[in-house]
Image (cartoon, helix red, strand yellow):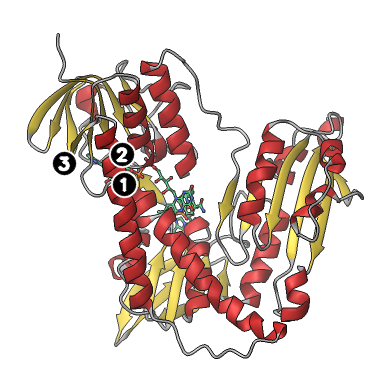
Amino acid sequence: MAYDFDLFVIGGGSGGVRCARIAAGHGARVGVAEERFWGGTCVNVGCVPKKLMVNAAEYAGWAEEAAGFGWDMEVRGFDLAKLAAARDAEVARLSGIYGRLLANAGVTSFDARASFIDAHTLDVGGRRVTAEKIVIAVGGRAVRPELPGAELGMLSDDVFTLKTLPKRLIVVGGGYIALEFACVFQALGSQVELVYRADMPLRGFDQDIRVALKAALDAQGIHQHVGHHPARLDRQGDHLRLSLLGGGAVEGDAVLFATGREPNTQGLHLDAAGVACTAGGAIEVDEDHRTTAPNIWAIGDVTDKLNLTPMATAVGHALADTLFGKTPRRASYLNVPTAVFTSPPIGTVGLTEADAAACGPVDIYLASFTPMRHTLSQRQGRKTLMKLIVCQETRKVLGAHMLGEDAAEIMQGIGIAVAAGLTKEDFDRTIGIHPTAAEEFVTMRTRTREAGLRAAAE
Ligand SMILES: Cc1cc2nc3c(=O)[nH]c(=O)nc-3n(C[C@H](O)[C@H](O)[C@H](O)COP(=O)(O)OP(=O)(O)OC[C@H]3O[C@@H](n4cnc5c(N)ncnc54)[C@H](O)[C@@H]3O)c2cc1C
Ligand SMILES: NC(=O)c1ccc[n+]([C@@H]2O[C@H](COP(=O)([O-])OP(=O)(O)OC[C@H]3O[C@@H](n4cnc5c(N)ncnc54)[C@H](O)[C@@H]3O)[C@@H](O)[C@H]2O)c1
């Protein structure tokens, strides 16, 4: 049977656009449907506008620090409307580039929602379209927690349409999104009330980093309501009141629920195509990202594996090469470096101490210091923490973690070393760049402690 397309991609976000573009480059006839915004979450309501807001927030600290370097500066205020206009213009520019990339690659784009009629047939904005192969790249969406009054709160998308800065902002959640926005709004001038369920922010991250981040949040004046579950949200006059389970409440002008995201599978009619989901609602895929239907694959956040833009694009690229480029390959989920754009930021790659120690004995190297800039700026609570986790048997660096200025930029290079399986001695042999904070990663000579000895004995 002759199909309309060799490949049809549902979703024009990070993963979908890359996959469509590369497949077309390999000579495939490709169609792609996007229902909301080209470039998807990352470009429109994720990484890009978020990072621009992080950049905006950084100036508050720099302005405060400048006096220590001899500057006599007066900060007269922050104009959210001005930032929003500049940010939105940049987002529109980038979204346009995504659209043009597809056109230049010869991909047929549909500004429409797609859903399955059967395994080879889609309804694309009311039109029947057939394809030999289909890739589902529909991403995820933020979800509100199930509690009375939850609709009164914002989700992360709503942050980008805020017209005024809330005086007091309640942020619920202890993950990436909650922490990044908590730091941004506190620096821009809101008083942030951060409510999370655990005893420490950023579950799953290295414990030393979590402890250091918690202290850094305190130091910048964020009020942390630790170990609390939200129970209900009510409007009281001109403010909102978030009641906590077991008593107590937090009040603010606005609430941001950053309590997680769910795969965007609603209304896709996956059953009609024989595509199954996991218990958590993600699309079930094998190691090649093939779904339970033999001609259909799924990539990116909708598979809920490692929900990061570079992961979605890497998987989309590998899949296009595999299906149409005669070079079968898989993108690796191991040793993926990642950053949390808090203040200060976090950069991390590889295993945490707890995960590494569960496998066998490891040496831990820790450095904690005040960066040179802050000896003059006198800004408090800006200590840098760096950590290496080294396998005692092989001497390989299994994990590297940092909280401190430029951590995201520094960790990209360290990520190459960890992914390449370099040893502590390889790090030690490398000459430092002086004077930087980064040089500490190659000058940590003295082991701080051992861990994982019990695991080895068992
Ligand atoms: C606030 C925030 C900040 C983030 N910051 C970072 C960061 O700093 N670094 C990082 O690496 N990651 C970050 N992420 C995560 C990153 O945005 C995602 O991992 C990435 O966008 C996933 O790409 P994707 O292609 O899987 O999905 P998406 O980019 O979400 O793209 C899916 C697209 O499919 C479209 N779609 C859905 N259903 C249909 C349908 N039926 N028909 C047609 N189109 C459809 C959607 O409109 C969307 O455009 C952030 C996310 C958020 C929310
Ligand atoms: N810098 C980055 O790379 C970056 C930034 C933002 C987002 N992301 C990606 O997006 C994903 C989603 O981020 P996220 O922060 O929404 O999710 P997350 O899973 O990281 O954090 C969700 C938080 O909400 C809490 N929570 C869940 N249900 C709750 C409830 N009912 N009441 C109170 N708290 C509740 C969880 O305990 C957790 O602390 C991340 O996992 C990450 O992959 C990456």
Residue with the mark numbered 2: 101
Q: Depth-wise, is mark 3 or mark 1 nearer the camera?
A: 1
Q: Residues within 10 Å of mark 2 (few under 14, many from 20)?
A: some
Identify the amino acid type marked 1.
Ile
Which of the two discs, 2 and 3, sits closer to the camera? Answer: 2
Q: Secondary structure at mark 3?
A: loop
User: Ligand 1 closer than 8 Å to the CB at disc 3?
Assistant: yes
Compared with residue 411, is residue 88 higher up or lower down, i.e. above or below? below
* Residue 289 in view (yes/no): no
Q: Residue furthest top?
A: 1
Q: Is residue 62 visible?
A: yes
From the viewer's perspective, is residue 129 above or below residue 40? above
Mark 3 surroundings: few (<14), some (14-19) or many (≥20) residues within 10 A: some
Q: Quadrant of residue 234?
A: bottom left
Q: Secondary structure at mark 1?
A: helix
Residue at screen point 65% across, 56% down: 407
Q: Residue at x 67, y 51 (%)?
A: 410
Q: CA distance from mark 2 to mark 3?
A: 18 Å
Local secondary structure at mark 2: helix
**Residues tagged 2 and 3 counted as in contact (Cβ below 8 A):** no
- Mark before the other along the chain sequence, 3 or 1: 1
Earlier along the polypeptide chain: callout 2 or callout 3? 2
Rendered location of residue 46, percent (x, y): 40, 55
Q: CA distance from mark 3 to mark 1?
A: 18 Å
Left/right of residue 32 with respect to residue 325 in the rendered view: left
The numbered disc on residue 97 is: 1
Residue 112 — which label? 3
Q: Nearer the viewer, residue 286 or 370?
A: 370
x then y, percent, for residue 92: 29, 57
Q: Disc 2 to disc 1, how far (Cα)?
A: 6 Å
Hey, what amino acid is under mark 3?
A: Ala
